[in-house]
Amino acid sequence: MVKVKIISLDKYFDKVRAVNNINLEINPGEFIVLLGPSGCGKTTLLRCISGLETVTSGKIFFDEEEVTHLPPKSRNVSMVFQSYAIWPHMTVNSNIGFPLRIKKYPSQEIERRIRWVAELLRIDNLLDRYPGQLSGGQRQRVAVARAIVMEPRLLLMDEPLSNLDALLRVRMRAEIRKLQENIKVTTIYVTHDQVEAMTMGDRIAVLNQGILQQLGSSEEIYHHPVNNFVAGFIGSPQMNFIEVKIVKQDKNLFLKTKGLEVPLLDEFKEAIYKLSDKTDYILGIRPEHIYITNQEQKDKTYPIKGKVYFAELLRSDTVIHLEKEFGFLLIKAPGDLKVEEGKDIEVLFDLLRIHLFDKDTGKAIF
């Protein structure tokens, strides 16, 4: 296990700044996920940590050792790629043992480690097969086995499940997480899939345009996003965003726009009083925090009415597109709920679950 510390890391490709002043500490044995959209810099950051990319500026430490300019072979890291990158002309046994043979380990030690990792990943019955005779999931296990057979102090994984079908991805998520808990190796995992990030990571680092937006547990990122990018990237369907004005009436505060006047609970008023005189903000609320009124009633809610424009019948859930004067509102309801398109319905905002963002900067107020 190794502690990874990244200080003020920048990476340019010509004039393009792919990684922008990243500061990050990863604890020994931690499983951390780099999450973000395509082109956000997460794979570039991973390659800088591995030594496959040269850092433009900044420093990388493994424990107390600076490795910023060390070649990959001197860092004792292993990497699993999106494309598996296993040799098609070699058997599973030869693929797994290849890095050990390159480093001239004794043959008995090579066989011991191959057997150990093959049993760990339940591919010990496939050692004599070639990659062309394996399924996608089996090839992925071979790639992971080859990465951990060296017993690296740091395991790097670059979207390793993106080529698998949906059902197999679910199974492999659990297997990789349980494997990491078993071998206790510090792991950095890159993905654009928020479900992978939320279910696998001890902590999640959300990136956008090369900038670290937020670092925290899945609970922190889901319930307390630091800005509207993180709020919108996490959650499916995406959080609803509504442009509103803060309106004071007597001692009460409201978030108001055409067709909507949401009262603020006392819990949030202090944060509003600390703001400047600016009145334009963005109200955020997740689709799962808007309830249909024929569901179980909840305290501290605000009712609004609208017309059902479209209903996505997912069977596990029903996603309702509600037409309002300010645009469409997405609502995540139980799968057995029956709604008619074109019909008016009443829904309830959970006033304890609303978010408010600065319209200009995107930063969260609460």
Image (spheres, rainbow, N blue to C red):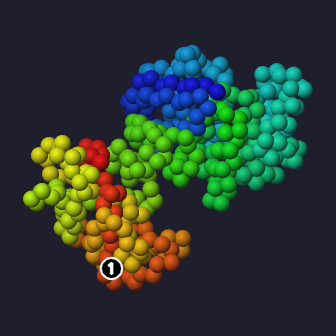
As drawn, 265 above or below 308:
above
Query: Residue 235 at x, y = what percent?
Result: 44, 56
- Number of numbered discs: 1
Question: Residue at image x 58%, y 34%?
Answer: 30
Task: Give whichever of 299, 141 is nearer the camera.
Answer: 299
- Dot 1, crowdedness within 10 Å: few (<14), some or many (≥20)? some
Q: Residue furthest top?
A: 65
Q: Residue furthest left?
A: 250
Question: Residue at image x 53%, y 20%?
Answer: 61
Q: In the image, 176: left or right of 6?
A: right
Q: Is residue 253 visible?
A: yes
Question: Helix or strand or loop: what does disc 1 sit on?
Answer: strand
Q: In the image, 207: left or right of 148?
A: left
Q: In the image, 255: left or right of 56?
A: left
Question: Residue at image x 83%, y 42%?
Answer: 119
Query: Residue 53 at x, y = what percent?
Result: 54, 27
Question: On the image, which quarter does residue 121 sit in?
Answer: top right
Task: Give whichever of 221, 49 is nearer the camera.
Answer: 221
Query: Residue 171 at x, y = what percent?
Result: 68, 54
Q: In the image, 140: left or right of 192?
A: right
As drawn, 243 above or below 89:
below
| Kind of residue indicated by mark 1 | Ile
Q: Is residue 94 visible?
A: no
Question: Residue at image x 38%, y 46%?
Answer: 225
The residue that disc 1 covers is 345
